[in-house]
Image (cartoon, rainbow, N blue to C red):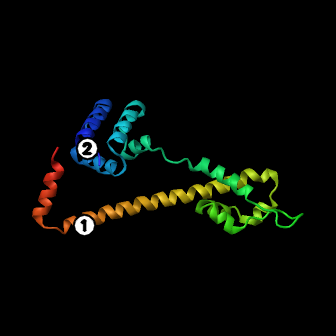
Amino acid sequence: MIDRKIFAVGMGVLAERFRTEIAGPAQKGYHTILSEELNDEEFQIAVKLAFRHSQFWPSPQQLIDFVRPPANHAVNAGIAFERLLDAGEILVQGRPKCWRREVVHRMGKAVLVGFDAIGGNDRLREYEARELPFIRRDFVEAYKATFAESEAELQIAAARTAIGSMRQRSLRSTPELIGDIARASEP
């Protein structure tokens, strides 16, 4: 949870930098989202980096990404593809390499998805050198797609949890709700 005073200073710095104020409800939204992801120090670093690098007022996700850059799945996919090629074994002398599914599976879900997307053993056993860039491209696309799906699923699950907790609060008595509103509006 980001301390409200530290948050107010950071938002003030950004407001000055971008010459615009953000309305109270939007600030509460920023505070809620950022507090789920960042601590006080990380928030201050994000503000400093946004002040330096952003041309426009940054979204909460942009502030988070300044402190915790998203993984570069394309680079990771290229490394995983090389590891996959190295994992092939010659089981019978004079025959092409073979990729055992259990070995590929141990390399991770994204590698297995990429392996299946490129046609698995059938395509890897018989490819010609000029085809390798296309096989790599197909593997990378499938590999990256698994992360895009899982990140979206995580965001959907988090949103559902937040909506569920809001519903729970709405079931409470009116005096409890008034107390929550009063506490939320305190500086």
Residue farthest toward the left in the current orientation of the protein: 175
55 or 90, which lies in front?
Answer: 90
Please tell me how many numbered marks the rendered image carries.
2
Dot 1: few (<14), some (14–19), or many (≥20) neighbours within 10 Å?
few
Q: Is residue 147 left or right of residue 155?
A: right
Q: Which mark is residue 117?
A: none
Quickly name the residue at label 2.
3
Could you tell me which residue is drawn at 77 percent across and 66 percent down? Answer: 122
Does residue 163 appear in the picture of this structure? yes
The residue under label 1 is which amino acid type? Arg
Residue 138 is left or right of residue 93, and the answer is left
**Between marks 1 and 2 in the image, the one whose residue lies nearer the viewer:** 2
Residue 50 appears at what percent x and percent y?
A: 39, 35
Tell me the CA gap for discs 1 and 2.
Answer: 26 Å
Q: Residues within 10 Å of mark 2 (few under 14, many from 20)?
A: few
Question: Pointer 1: what residue?
Answer: 167
Quarter containing the C terminus: top left
82 or 135: nearer the viewer:
82
Which amino acid lies under the numbered mark 2 shown in the image of this protein? Asp
Q: Residue 24, located in which quarter of the rendered image?
A: top left
* Residue drawn at the location 73% of the way across and 50% of the way down: 133
Relative height, residue 114 to residue 34 (above, below): below
